[in-house]
Each structure stands twice: as C-alpha cells, then as structure tokens.
Image: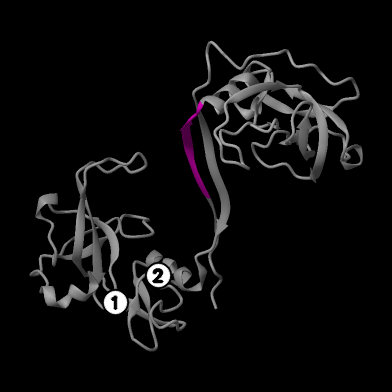
Amino acid sequence: MPAVLKAPLIVEFPFTRSLGPVQSAFLTGLRDRVVLGVKTGDGRTLVPPVEYDPVTAEEIRDLVEVAPTGTVTTWAWNHEPRRDQPLSSPFAWVLVRLDGADTALLHALDAPGPDAVRTGMRVRVRWAEDRVGAITDIACFEPYDGDPAEPTGHSGEFEDPVTGIVAAARLDYVYSPGRAQTAYIKALSERRNVGERCPSCRKVYVPPRGACPTCGLATSEQVEVGPGGTVTTFCIVNIKAKNLDIEVPYVYGHIALDGAGLALHGRIGGIPYDQVRMGLRVEPVWTEGGRYPDHYRPTGEPDADYETYKELL
C-alpha cells in the first residue's frame, strides 16, 4: 500500500470584535497599568470582569480596582513554550487571585523552574513596556515577597478608551487526507481523475471518501472517470477574493465527470460567463506543472440531455 500523504496546514485570519463598556474599561485599564474588576450584587469582585453575573445572569457594570499583587491558586509547568506565548523560555501557567478579587486570572509566571512554583505563593504583575489595551499588556507575573499593593482608587473612567480589538486566530496542524484521497491526489498529479466504487450501490465517488456515505461500506475499487464532464449547476462570482488572481466575474460550477456518481466543483473558463449553462460539456485544462485542473472549458460537443444528469444536481 502506498504511503498516505500528510502535510502541515495553517488556518489563520484576523478576528475583529468590538468591546462593551466592561471589557473596554478592563483593557483600557491594563494599558494604563490599572487592573479593574466588576462587583456583583452579592459583593463578589470578578477579575477578569464579565458583563453578566455567572450565577444570577444579572447585568453588572460596577467597576472596581484591584491590586496588581496576588496569590497563585493553581499552576502547571510549560516545558516547551509555543509561538506567541507570553514567554519564550519555560514558564508556569498560573491562576492568580489578585488582592481584592474573588476569582482568579490566568496568565504566565516567570520562574526559574517548577521547583520554584507552588500553590499559595505570592506574585505581582510585570507590565509590558509597550501597552496597547490588550491582555498582553500584562507581560507575565513574577514572584513577589513584599506587602500587598494598594489600589490607586481608579474610577474606571478613561478619556481615550479602547473600543475594539483585533486578534490573530491561528490553528497549526498536520493534515492527512487518508488512503482514498491520497490515491486521488496522486492520480491528479498524473492528470487523471480516479474515484472509488461502492460494492453495494455501485456509485462512484469522486473525490473518493474511503466509504460509501449511503451504504456505510468501505470502498476500494478504483475507477478512472472523465476526463470530460457535464456542468450540472453553476454560479457567477462577482466578488474578487484576495488570495485568487482571477478577475471577476467568473463562473464556478459543479461538474459531473463521465462515469462519476456525483459532481465535483471547478472553475469554468474559455467561454463568456453569461454563456455558461446547465448541460454544457466541458474538459479539464491543465497548466504546466499544475497538480490539479486550472479550470474546465467547453469541448464543443452538444449539450447533455437533462435526463442524463438530473440525478447529479
């Protein structure tokens, strides 16, 4: 059996969100080296603050300052920091209950090793040099053996509040397409389209899935399909994607390759966008060194009869 493919994959995008009055005050306070919590109706002080009481669901807006010193309530040692974590050398993840707060804040503790960390140890905030109104304005916590710090009595009102944040959402992982799609991808590199047939219903899946979703049976019989096919349905794209060097408008359609039991999608070119139609017969166009068809173009054959592809819509 040929080796199954695998490759690193990164999904990343900037996530933008607006802040309500409570989160705006909290992050603005960090920018100005002030830690704010919110007081509930029964007198608890929550840090980080939330807009609704987690017990009663009542809206809470009563901001109160807490001290930048506190006590570790629990911790875990991080032997191998990852990209964009607070510290580049090994550190402890800690939950810290700041003096004046009733809940704990999660952050990093800069310590020489796990033997130097314990539940109940005293710590204080180490502020980042450049602060912008984000949780990273707290660079980390550090061990502290002095007296509890006193809040400055800040009201929670700011002249230039932070009203929104942009956070980079990123997921790094290794993707493996599995046995069936590995064979499909390798066939594409040879400019062939290969599917797999269900042993029960005899439907040919392209791309193959390794099992028939209807019958629940494993598929292993490979079937070469195409190269020609029929446009079953399509849409006209009028909004240009940032990562595609294709001028709009263009057509993206579902194409039932000859011999396949369902349609795959692809771009349709070589014809004005307003002349693309259901039943149009097309063939793949490969670019030099391309690993998959760049687009599909008309073959010049008569349009397929609707009855021949209506079950593939």
User: For this rendering, which residue is in front, 107 or 147?
Assistant: 147
As drawn, the label of residue 45 is: none
Q: Say whether marks 2 and 1 touch (CB < 8 Å).
A: no
Q: Is residue 236 left or right of residue 291?
A: left
Sequence-wise, the earlier of marks 2 and 1 is 2
Determine the secondary structure under disc 1.
loop
Above or below residue 207? Residue 62 is above
Residue at 48% x, 69% y: name it.
182
Give the quarter of the image for residue 105: top right
User: For this rendering, which residue is in front, 10 or 27?
Assistant: 27
Residue at 32% x, 81% y: name it.
203
Residue that numbered label 1 is attached to: 261
Amino acid type assigned to the residue bearing label 2 in the image: Ala
The magenta segment? 10-20
User: For this rendering, which residue is in front, 217 or 252?
Assistant: 217
The quadrant of the image that shows the N terminus is bottom right
Residue 133 visible from this viewpoint = no
Magenta portion: prevailing SS class:
strand
- Between marks 2 and 1 in the image, the one whose residue lies nearer the viewer: 1
Q: In this view, does 265 lie to the left or right of 162?
A: left
Residue that extends furthest to the front in the rendered view of this protein:
42
Residue at 51% x, 73% y: name it.
179
Residue that extends furthest to the top in the rendered view of this protein:
159
Residue 307: x and y in percent read 13, 77
Residue 77 visible from this viewpoint = yes
Q: Does the magenta stretch include residue 17?
A: yes
Above or below residue 199? Residue 187 is above
Q: Is residue 302 magenta?
A: no
Residue that numbered label 2 is attached to: 187
